[in-house]
Amino acid sequence: MIKNLLLISCCLLLVNCAARDALVSSSGATTGAVTAGATCSTVVNDPYAIAACAMAGAAHGADQIWNDDFNNHKKYFVDHLIGAPNKPNITNWYNPKTKNSGIIKTTRTWYKGPFKCRDYESTIDIAPSWPMQWASSGPVRRTNFGVACMLPDGRIEIQK
């Protein structure tokens, strides 16, 4: 049991040492490592299996933080399209924990029958957290342009 706790502690220290911003960017990785490592230690006694569980948990936790910022951008995108005035407008978001950000701009609003449509520009700058950054090709920096229409039931439809 002491070996298992020592192994999990070492994994946590390595996770925190490797992160650029140890307290912030590795919080999901640390939580994932602790949860997975502790769960595995109740089932198996092999320290290598416990370490593998902790590393898998760390990767999953970091991935969840990264995906949360993509979901955060989608939330701001929809909220902006629904709530922006009928003139050019900009919404910015920034996550101080991950330093990821996004910008949503609407430039023109018009009605297509019962649908309210807007020209938009959506920019994201999202970098994966450690340990996912070694497996990715780098930050996602992308700008999309298009037309989005609000349907009567509240859904947003992206026009091509």
Image: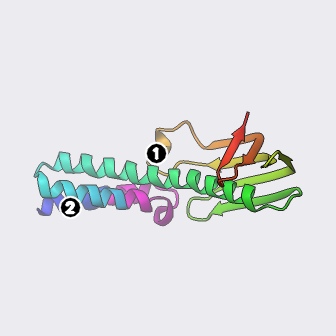
- Secondary structure beneath label 1: helix
Residue under the point 52% across and 61% down: 21
**19 in magenta:** yes
Specify start and end residues of the magenta stretch as a single range: 12-30
Closer to the camera in the image, 58 or 6 = 58
The colour scheme is: rainbow
The tag earlier along the polypeptide, 2 or 1, is: 2
Closer to the camera in the image, 132 or 151 = 151
Closer to the camera in the image, 39 or 5 = 39
Q: In which quarter of the image is the N terminus?
A: bottom left
Left or right, 125 with reference to 66:
right
Q: Quadrant of the C terminus?
A: top right
> Which mark identifies residue 6?
2
Residue under the point 46% across and 38% down: 135
Left or right, 92 with reference to 88:
left
Q: Distance between the residues labelled 2 and 1?
A: 24 Å
**Rendering coords of residue 77 (x, y %):** 68, 54
Q: Name the residue under label 1.
A: 132
- At label 1, the amino acid type is Met
Name the quadrant containing residue 12.
bottom left
**Rendering coords of residue 157 (x, y %):** 68, 43
Q: Can residue 7 be seen by looking at this rendering?
A: no
Residue under the point 16% across and 56% down: 41
- 10 Å neighbourhood of mark 1: few (<14), some, or many (≥20)? some
Q: How many numbered callouts?
A: 2
**Rendering coords of residue 153 (x, y %):** 65, 53
